[in-house]
Amino acid sequence: MNGENSAMGRLHPVPALIYLLSVIFITMFSPAPVILSLSLVGGALFCTSVQSAKQTRSDIGFYLPLFVLIAVTNPLFSHDGVTPLFFMNGNPVTLEALLYGVDIAAMMISVLIWCKCFSIIITTDKTLYLLGGVLPKLSLVLSVSLRYIPLMKKKWRQIKDAQIAMGYYSESGFTAKLMSSARVFSALVTWSLENAVNVGASMKARGYGATKRTHFSLFRFTVADGGFTFAALALAGAAFIGMWRGKFDFSFYPRMADTDLSFEGICFYALFAVFVFIPFIFEVTEAVKWKYLRSKI
């Protein structure tokens, strides 16, 4: 599924930004295993629902080895803890250090997954919309820069293909390939400078900077956006209160602490679970609704 066509992708950029930044912040500063597990599962389910199965398999191939690498690295360098599992070069590899490594790995992978969700949902158009009113010059620079990246990649291939057709591009050796790439790069720089001059002349001809800038947006803040914003702020506020009250803290050294299973702690965990599973619930609801409507055709 295309991220822009997903339930979260159709939200107004402001509530989507508030939600995603809140989840990322809470995940980064909450070491409690329950919180990180919920964030990891919620982020993985959401990311899976807004991208292709092929991309999901590729992500698993990247995240799983990274998770294992981070988890096993900590006990190799940190020997704190009171429960040794075995000794390596005379140094103890402790259970507490291993579990702390797993905790750090869960936090880092969770943040990476939520950041990927951020890049899928907060598209270039939404980024420019969010920055356009506050930082218009920065918005313009980002717009032009992001537009230039695919243009320059396409132009590089065109120049390279043209030079190959004329016999100017050689891959017979490292030096020859380096010289050929340098010629392509030189032509690309020349083209980019000429194109920049043309873009500047076009902007001047259209009156850019002559008067106060007006704004046009395709995004409209609806009642549904307002409801989502209220719910996201309420649940994020509950999570921040839980952090402030120490419910999301956890200690691994010298001995691993017990998980807070008090009524208050369970309530905060439940509210955070609802918070991180909202996007996946939205996507599942939309998918079920779509299949139901199609069955009525």
Image (spheres, rainbow, N blue to C red):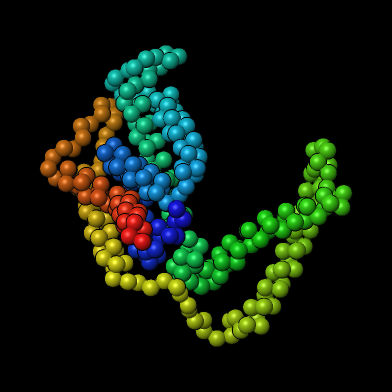
Give the percent coordinates (x, y) of residue 115: 43, 50
Q: Residue at x 32, y 53 (%)?
A: 288
* Quarter of the C terminus within the rendering: bottom left
Q: Is residue 131 visible?
A: no
Left or right: 93 in relation to 138: left
Q: What residue do we see at 24% from left, 55% from top?
A: 235
**Residue 130 versus residue 162 in the image, above or below:** below
Q: Is residue 81 above or below residue 244?
A: above
Determine the residue positioned at 28% across, 71% down.
Answer: 223
Between 2 and 218, the residue placed more toward the observer is 2
When asked about the image quadrant of residue 201, the answer is: bottom right
Q: Position of residue 205 (x, y in %)?
A: 66, 83
The residue sitting at the left extreme is 263
Residue 132 visible, this angle? yes
Residue appearing at x 55%, y 64% in the figure: 142
Front-most of 100 and 62? 62
The residue closer to the viewer here, 186 or 95, is 186
- Of 131 and 83, the residue lying toward us: 131
Q: Residue furthest bottom?
A: 211
Percent of width and height locating residue 279: 33, 53
Question: Would residue 263 be found to the left or right of residue 235 on screen?
Answer: left
Q: Position of residue 47 (x, y in %)?
A: 41, 48
Q: Quadrant of residue 33?
A: top left
